[in-house]
Amino acid sequence: MDIQKMDLAGSFADAAQRIQGQLAALPSAALDDFDPQETVLAVIDMNNGFAKGGALYSPYVEAIIPAVRALTTRCREKNILSVLYTDCHGPQSPEFASFPPHCVRGSGEEQIIDELRDIEGVQIVEKASTNGFYNWYIKELLDTYEIKKLIVCGCVTDICVYQFCQAVKTYCTQNDRELAVVVPLDCVDTYDIPGVHGRDFANAAACASLLAGGITLVRHIG
């Protein structure tokens, strides 16, 4: 790769136009089309440390709480297994070399937000890294049951949601297994830090990569 010869401005402009067109054309989906016996909902990191306060709080994540609650409530009404992943770190987590300390066990930040905790029948699962796949809970579900569709929502689009979707999809591909991973875009978002992490760019880049990896994106699941 010759960095000096890269046309980043032109490449990004072309990519932005293409991604914008792809996202504008996305359909919505109907929850009635998801068989409860073959579907799992995975909600990623909708906890106090990201949605309510703390070093990694994002108002954009807080803003999706009503949509995530509505989807989770409807999934439970249809008896769709709903797994709520939450970041939960020890005080010396290696992850704190990359991110400020957050969601430390016992701090309260690691607790799932009240708006989801009060939904009857949800399963709360702790994870200690950005990728929830590696606590193996979803792997065990996939290995045990005939799951054909996985709905993924929560935060943040370009890190924890992205890594989880790609890991689950590639695990199934490795094992010659079909799995539709579906992400409703009204139920995901990321953070914005000017000059460091642009929300719009991060969301768009993550969506483009998810689509390229065989993940299904929809506007909304109603």
Image (tube, grey):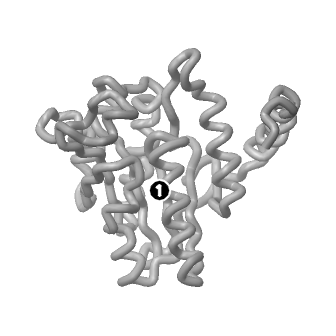
Reply above or below: 193 against 28: above
How many numbered marks, from 0 up?
A: 1
Q: Quadrant of the N terminus?
A: top right
Q: Is residue 13 visible?
A: no
What residue appears at the point 36 percent right and 53 percent down from the top-left corner?
Answer: 73
Left or right of 185: which side holds 77? left
Of 208 and 11, nearer the camera is 11
Helix, strand or loop at disc 1?
A: helix
User: Viewed as shown, does residue 23 lie left or right of 77?
Assistant: right
Report which residue position mark 1 lands on. 164
Q: Considering only vertical position in the picture, is 108 above or below 221? A: above
Residue drawn at 31 percent across, 62 percent down: 135
- Residue at 43% across / 24% down in the picture? 59
Give how far across and how far down residue 145 sits, in percent.
Answer: 39, 83
Q: Residues within 10 Å of mark 1 (few under 14, many from 20)?
A: some
Q: Is residue 104 visible?
A: yes
Q: Quadrant of residue 77?
A: bottom left
Q: Quadrant of residue 76?
A: bottom left
Q: Residue 51: where, in percent of width, then height?
A: 35, 31
**Identity of the residue drawn at 39% across and 72% down:** 139
Q: Is residue 143 above or below residue 20?
A: below
Whole-percent x, y for residue 29 in the image: 62, 58
Judged from this view, the residue extending furthest toward the top is 194
Q: Residue 40: x, y in percent?
A: 42, 67
Give amino acid for label 1: Phe
Residue at the extreme left of the image, as rendered: 106
85 or 69: nearer the eye? 85
